[in-house]
Image (cartoon, rainbow, N blue to C red):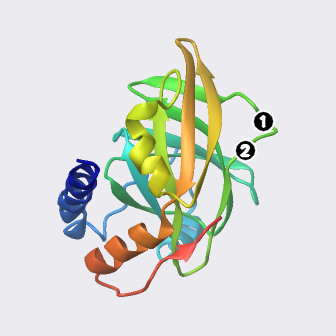
Amino acid sequence: MKKNLRLIAILLLFGSCSFLKSHLGSNSGSSEVNQSNDSVKANIRNRAIIHMISPLDLEIVLVHLEDNKQEKFLVDKTLSQIEMKPGHWKVVGIIHKGIHHKLMNTSKQFIFQIKKDKNTYVGSYIFQCPKVTRIHVDELKQMGFFNRYPFTSKTGLCELVVGSDFERVNRVWGQLSQDQHSLELGF
């Protein structure tokens, strides 16, 4: 039974990623802060690859640590490719179904690095309220490691789990990507 569930999960991943194959050149990120033309040019070849396990269509609010600018990026695919400036980024919020969730514990933060002229894997994400439940145990077991980050909003508590499933994501990326460059690890 477990093998069948894993096979179904892998098939769903490939099926949802097939849509991505025809859209690899598009930018799925939107900026909360206006970017200069130089900044946009710098972003063209620096991409974050995010594996969103659940749910889709949420926005991740990040701060670029080198210039302290906050930006929002829409994650609308299982394997999203988002153009970003190189450097270190910190997750500070999540927007899901129009509700803004802020990071509760600022001493426990998820920071990743976008490498210049690289496609950088920045984690596998699960977001759920009030906590990530046993529904996602199989996905969590496949990860090399994961960390839990608490968020709060006017509607209550939520949790973001960020983990590493680098080998599997890199393998799927290699099958989908047209540029044939493997992913770099960003954390």
User: Can you give x and y, in whole percent of width and height, for residue 10 in the image?
Assistant: 26, 59
**Amino acid at the residue labelled 2:** Gln
Please tell me which residue lies in front, 45 or 146.
146
Q: Residue at x 51, y 67 (%)?
A: 121
Task: Residue 174: name its quadrant.
Answer: bottom left
Q: Is residue 98 above or below residue 13?
A: above
Q: Secondary structure at mark 2?
A: loop
User: Judging from the image, what secondary structure is the residue with disc 1 in?
Assistant: loop
Residue located beneath label 1 in the image: 106
> Label for residue 75?
none
Q: Is residue 111 above or below residue 179?
A: above
Compared across the picture, whether 70 is left or right of 29 comes to right
Report crowding for label 2: few under 14, some 14 to 19, many 20 or more residues within 10 A (C-alpha).
some
Residue at x-position 45% and y-position 57%: 142
Residue pictured at 56% horizontal, 31% vertical: 159
Q: Is residue 93 left or right of residue 16?
A: right
Give the distance between the C-alpha atoms of the residues marked 2 and 1, in whole angstroms.
6 Å
Q: Is residue 147 visible?
A: yes
Tag 2 residue: 109
Q: Is residue 140 above or below residue 67?
A: above
